[in-house]
Amino acid sequence: MCELCKRPTETTRHHLVPRSRKRRDREAFGPVADLCPDCHRKCHATWDNATLARDYNTVEKLASAPELQTYIKWIRKQAPTVYFGSKERLDD
């Protein structure tokens, strides 16, 4: 289940502090959130890595971000099998 939109679908790991903002040490990568590919893409399309690391480093902060309110309301109504990121399907 996506931790952001709450749809029961396959998820990807979203580093709450982007890996590019951390040391190269694997232990420094920190916590992750399980996001569907659509929500994951939306987060990275909305903010750069510095902003994600500084201002949106928890699921709660992402979910309450004014920039995502309309998107979250919309995506929650979509079927969990629908993928909006590209013309390719996830299982291809």
Image (cartoon, rainbow, N blue to C red):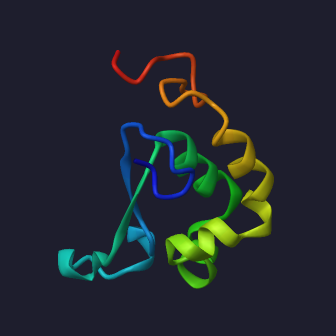
Give the image location of residue 85, x and y in percent: 58, 31
Q: What residue is rendered at 57% in x and 27% in y? A: 79
In this picture, is 61 found above or below 5? below
Q: What residue is rendered at 68% in x and 51% in y? A: 72
* Quadrant including the C terminus: top left
Give the image location of residue 64, x and y in percent: 69, 71
Give the image location of residue 87, x and y in percent: 56, 16
Residue 77: which quarter of the image? top right
Q: Nearer the viewer, residue 31 or 3?
A: 3
Q: What residue is rendered at 54% in x and 57% in y? A: 4
Would residue 19 appear left or right of 49 to someone viewing this image?
left
Q: What residue is rendered at 35% in x and 67% in y? A: 32
Number of dots carrying numbers: 0
In this picture, is 62 found above or below 72? below
In this picture, is 58 found above or below 37? below
Q: Nearer the viewer, residue 92 or 59?
A: 59
Would residue 25 appear left or right of 74 to someone viewing this image?
left
